[in-house]
Amino acid sequence: MQAYLVAFVVSLVVAWFVTPYVKKLAFRIGAVDRPNARKVHHTIMPRLGGLAIYCGFMLAVLCCMEISKDVLAMLLGGTIILIVGICDDIYQLTAKAKLLGQIVAALVLIAFDIRIEWFNNPLGGYFYLDYLSIPFTIFWVVSFTNVVNLMDGLDGLAAGVSSIASVTVILVALQQGFYPVAIITAALAGGTLGFMRYNFNPATIFMGDTGSLFIGYMLAAISIFGAVKSAATIALLVPAIALGLPIMDTAFAIIRRYTSGRPIFQPDKGHFHHRLLAMGLTQKQAVILMYLISAALGVAAILFADLDGIYAVLLLVIIITLVFIGAKKMGVFSER
């Protein structure tokens, strides 16, 4: 059996069997999510589910990969971000404390020379970042980390969208012949899908910041790892396109809050999933619709990997335009 398939199965099985024990631990240590006016659940729910994903991921990587310097950096950074998530799920960290933890985790990658140093120019040649390499890498990691976190608003939503993005990265990595990326992403996908057994509506446990921050961080780290070892633009933009829905949802939230004079980091009920619920969809219907949109973006990401130059840029413009039009029709830019 191919190593990436083994990694996927090992991670899935471990997360599947560990999650019930994590649920008990969450209640014991007080890592619970209490309902409020903004949230859609009405009972106290255990968080910390990301710990099960982490356990499956780590065991799969240790079993199926050679622990090179690059892999070690991702595992260390992932462990740091996991600790940040656990602390937040238990103690509700401030935004500044979480941001500091994310920056520290990003700096681990940079310390091991995993950083974004250049881009392909679609018209030919390369763009070199030079002294902007470190700040841009930090920005990339922190952005990805928070995008998945902000998507975690309905049962199974963040886990499912992240799984679709991970499968997309696996397929492109295999297509490009970069097997280390395929293996480590398969370990992430397996853990996330194993956890979904308990997280899909009606959920019995949430992944919490422990899971959402870890998944976002690992997808960011994997994309940079691929950029270091292969074609930079493809490696970076494929997961970004696959995660296009939460990325654009986050961007639209920033625009919405800024134009309405609200603090950018103040939560609201204007996200895509909130709008879908307001339109009369059930949680399951809203989540499945967002899965389908993410799957379509995943297909677009795979097509992007096969395109060159101006055609790749044109595909990106078309995707962004269609999502923008859909968001405007849903009223995502307005306060409600």
Image (spheres, rainbow, N blue to C red):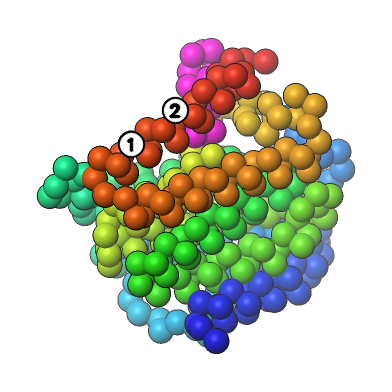
Q: Can residue 233 be seen in the rendering of this structure?
A: yes
Magenta stretch holds residue 46: no
**Residue 314, numbered label:** 1
Q: Position of residue 146 (x, y in %)?
A: 51, 44
Q: Is residue 198 above or below residue 138?
A: below
Q: Is 227 placed above or below 335 here?
A: below
Q: Is residue 96 above or below residue 270?
A: below
Query: Is 218 placed above or below 73 here?
Result: above
Residue at x 33%, y 76% (from the top left corner): 69
Give the residue drawn at x 67%, y 15%.
336
Checking the image for residue 121, the label placed there is: none
With 313 as the anchor, is 302 left or right in this view?
A: right
Say which of 269 and 85 sits in front: 269
Q: Main secondary structure of the magenta part?
A: helix
* Residue at 57% across, 81% down: 6
Identify which amino acid the numbered label 2 is placed on: Thr
Q: Which of 316 and 185 lies nearest the eye of the viewer? A: 316
The N terminus, quarter of image? bottom right
Residue in view at x 37 percent, y 39 percent: 315
Q: Quadrant of residue 34?
A: top right
Cβ–Cβ under 8 Å for marks 2 and 1: no
Q: Identify the amino acid type marked 1.
A: Leu
Residue 119, image x and y in percent?
A: 22, 50
Q: What residue would you read off at disc 2?
A: 321
State yes or no: residue 259 in magenta. yes
Query: Which element type, helix, strand or loop, lies under badge 2?
Result: helix
Span shown in magenta: 248-264
Mark 1: few, some, or many residues within 10 Å (few <14, many ≥20)?
Answer: few
Instruction: Give the CA separation, mark 2 to mark 1.
Output: 11 Å
**Badge 2 or badge 1: first in the primary sequence:** 1
Taking depth in this image into account, of 215 and 21 the one nearest to the observer is 215
Name the foreground residue: 46 vs 257.
Answer: 257
